[in-house]
Amino acid sequence: MKVRKVNASDMDSFIRLYFEAYKGLENYAYRLRRDVKRYFKWLLSRDADGFFVAELDQPIGFVACDTNWYSYVENCYVGEIHELFVHPDYRRRGVGSFLLNRVIEYAKGRGRSLAGLWVGKENYVAKKFYSRHGFVETVLLGKWARMIRRI
């Protein structure tokens, strides 16, 4: 598996994989292609150095960490993980863990001592995944749960 920084030419792969990864989780996802396209551009604009893609012959997962994010929940700058998804055929093979660890190290290298993310409050698979990686749930807000981890 190869992991590299995302660039603008990855947009179509991101969109395709996003819709595949969010099947069954549409309550927490953008539903229109134009919204996912806008989201991709926003992620790239926030912190391009923290946006990675995992590839075999093709992209199989993406992660976006924003070290420029000020969290009003924690009242500090954090390594905010805005997105992490893996193609369903490649789940439970360590791809998500590898991507998560990659951005944790990236955030540490940028001087962040806390990583944070929002996850669907009923997305129990993702919440268990993050818990296994040391994240703890702190706040519920609507359909979202806040999870943080000291790094």
Image (spheres, rainbow, N blue to C red):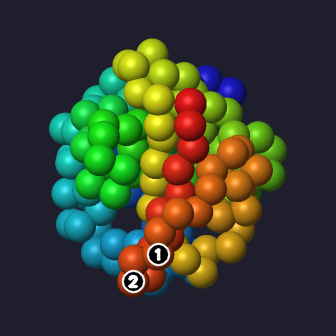
Q: Amino acid at mark 2?
A: Gly
Q: Is residue 7 visible?
A: no
Instruction: Say which quadrant the N terminus sits in.
Output: top right
Kindly report the distance in space between the C-alpha atoms of the residues bearing marks 2 and 1: 6 Å
Please identify the residue farthest to the front as the structure is shown: 75
| Cβ–Cβ under 8 Å for marks 2 and 1 | yes
Q: Is residue 124 left or right of residue 65?
A: right
Q: Is residue 148 visible?
A: yes
Foreground pick, 58 / 132: 132
Foreground pick, 30 / 128: 128
Residue bearing mark 1: 140
Foreground pick, 5 / 104: 104
Residue 10 lies in quadrant? top left
Please give the name of the residue rendered at 55% of the width and 77% of the height, measured from the top-left corner: 121
Q: Amino acid at mark 1?
A: Leu
Above/below status of 48 relative to 31: above
Disc 2 element? loop
Residue bearing mark 2: 142
Q: How many circles with numbers are drawn on the protein?
A: 2
Above/below status of 67 relative to 31: above
Q: Is residue 37 left or right of residue 110?
A: left
Question: At which x and y percent is residue 108?
Answer: 48, 22
Report the disc number at residue 8. none
